[in-house]
Amino acid sequence: MVFVLEGGPRAGQLVDDLPAGYRAQGGVHGASAALFDDVFADVAVWRGDRDTPAGPA
């Protein structure tokens, strides 16, 4: 599956595997972006890297 990344450090990139911190957009069929006339990709949004601490305590 191909994803278009929205937000975060990799915004605008096309990927075939979601990097850490991104989540596929929800919905009945998911959100998709038209890349070309008949080519679509699912949208993944930046949710932050959940494995990295938020900052100093």
Image (cartoon, rainbow, N blue to C red):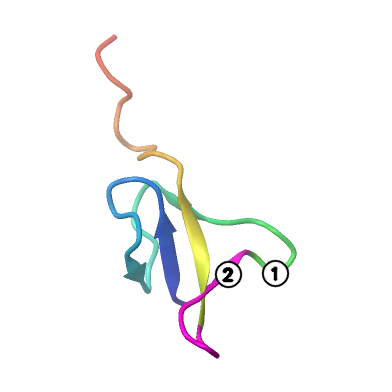
Q: Quadrant of the C terminus?
A: top left
- Looking at the rendered structure, the secondary structure element under dot 2 is strand
Q: In the image, which is nearer the foreground, mark 2 or mark 1? A: 2
In the image, residue 53 lies in the stretch drawn in magenta: no
Residue 2, by quadrant, is bottom left
Which of the labelled discs sits on residue 32, or is there none? 2
Task: Determine the secondary structure under disc 1.
Answer: loop
The magenta stretch is 31-39
The foreground one among 55 and 36 is 36
Q: Amino acid at mark 1?
A: His
**Image spot of residue 33 (x, y percent):** 53, 71
Three-letter code for the amino acid on which mark 2 is drawn: Ser
Rate crowding at label 1 as few (under 14), some (14 to 19) or many (20 or more) other CA atoms within 10 Å.
few
Mark sitting on residue 46:
none
Contact? badges 2 and 1 (CB < 8 Å) = yes
Please say if 27 is above or below 38. above
The relative height of residue 25 versus residue 7 in the rendered view (above or below) is below
Magenta segment's dominant SS is loop
Q: Nearer the viewer, residue 34 or 9?
A: 34
Please name the residue shown 34% across and 57% down the image: 19
Mark 1 lies on residue:
29
User: Quarter-wise, where is residue 49 in the image?
Assistant: top left
**Separation of marks 2 and 1 at Cα, in angstroms:** 9 Å
